[in-house]
Image (tube, rainbow, N blue to C red):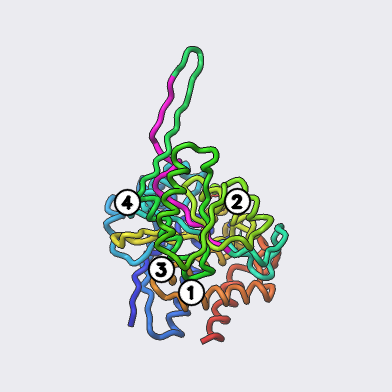
Amino acid sequence: MKNFKIANIPGDGIGKEVVPAAANVLKAIAAIHGGLRFEFTEFPWSCEYYMEHGKMMPEDGLEIIKDYNAIFLGAVGNIELVPDHISLWGLLIKFRREFEQVINYRPAKVLPGVKSKIVNPKDFDLIVVRENSEGEYSEVGGRIFRGEDEIAIQNSIFSRRGTERVMRFAFELAAKRKKHVTSATKSNGIFHSMPFWDEVFKDVSRDYSTIETDSQHIDALAAFFVTNPERFDVIVASNLFGDVLSDLGAAIMGSVGVAPAANINVNGKYPSMFEPVHGSAPDIIGKNIANPIGQIWTAKLMLDHFGEEELGSLLLDVIENTTNKGILTPDIGGKHTTSEVTEEIIEGLKARF
Ligand code: ATP
Ligand code: MG
């Protein structure tokens, strides 16, 4: 019997609705599979927790969950109670940094039955792999005065180790898919970091002779997302470019409510964190209309991470059958509830075993 220990953190807002929904889907998978078990422990760390304790999690919070196989997080944020920079830095960003989750990846695909504004939505099926620890989002730089003028200087940090690491991750993912990696660059405009990025990409690609590669400037690449999505399988990008591309990907999917994401620790020392793209969605709390698909698809990424890729594929297949049948929450044009969509996915799984 395989046993996976999962730290559930529903967090704020609709996180409290979609995390239990997705956990029920995983429990159903375990019950019908028979050979594996998910051991969930729930932690109430959130903005409400902050109101009571003056912090987002206990002092020894990291210590408490460092030996779990994964963190399954809903959403963090309630600006009525706690300013965003305090809630995010107190929980999410702390996990990312302390647990060395240096890679963020987000599959983006237009699900059947969901409307998208792009020309060929059927061809839109890709993964954005984003470097999540260095690059453009650095604290190096400052402000200087030159005569009357004030100047801000922002340095980007690209280490060979960090760049290689994210690229290798992208190649490994592509090897399990359509075997194509696109590098997002801008070496025609950025003088030091992007030529280095291109050089490392060439070096790493030599180790993966069966994978096709190309390099696209970020501006053209973003346009191709909309006009020629069939060009893409896995896209590897720096912190800033990856941030922009993955939000574009979620927008093309039709609703942020369906978009999954993972924050990966690659050295195996700490748990990875699985959290969908959407936030706490304060405008729809308590109405049973939050789309659970983003969280459930995120659970699929967690299954993949556990090495249960067959189960992961099966789950995505069942999600697609559900949307294709028109079982949709309002954000993607339907009239169904969170519970109905979740129940349909669970029934779909039962039928497939
Ligand atoms: P955060 O700062 O936490 O990311 P936000 O307000 O920027 O919060 P979301 O919380 O994702 O972003 O909400 C953006 C919009 O998308 C809201 O109108 C919200 O209702 C909607 N939304 C987000 N998640 C879902 C979901 N799972 N199902 C349906 N609608 C959603
Ligand atoms: Mg936001």
Q: Which residue is mark 3?
A: 305
Which callout, 1 or 2, points to the residue nearer the camera? 2
Q: Is residue 137 above or below residue 110?
A: above
Is residue 139 highlighted in magenta?
Answer: yes
Instruction: Identify residue type, mark 2.
Output: Leu
User: Which residue is under mark 2?
Assistant: 221
What stretch of residues is rendered in magenta? 126-144
- Quadrant of ligand 1: it is bottom right
Q: Amino acid at mark 4?
A: Glu
Q: Is 65 placed above or below 32 here?
A: above
Dot 4 or dot 3, earlier in sequence: 4
Q: Which residue is mark 1?
A: 312
**Disc 3 to disc 1, how far (Cα)?**
9 Å
N-terminal-most mark, 3 or 2: 2
Check disc 3 and give the amino acid type: His
Looking at the picture, tell me which residue is in the foreground, 115 or 222.
222
Q: Residues within 10 Å of mark 1 (few under 14, many from 20)?
A: many
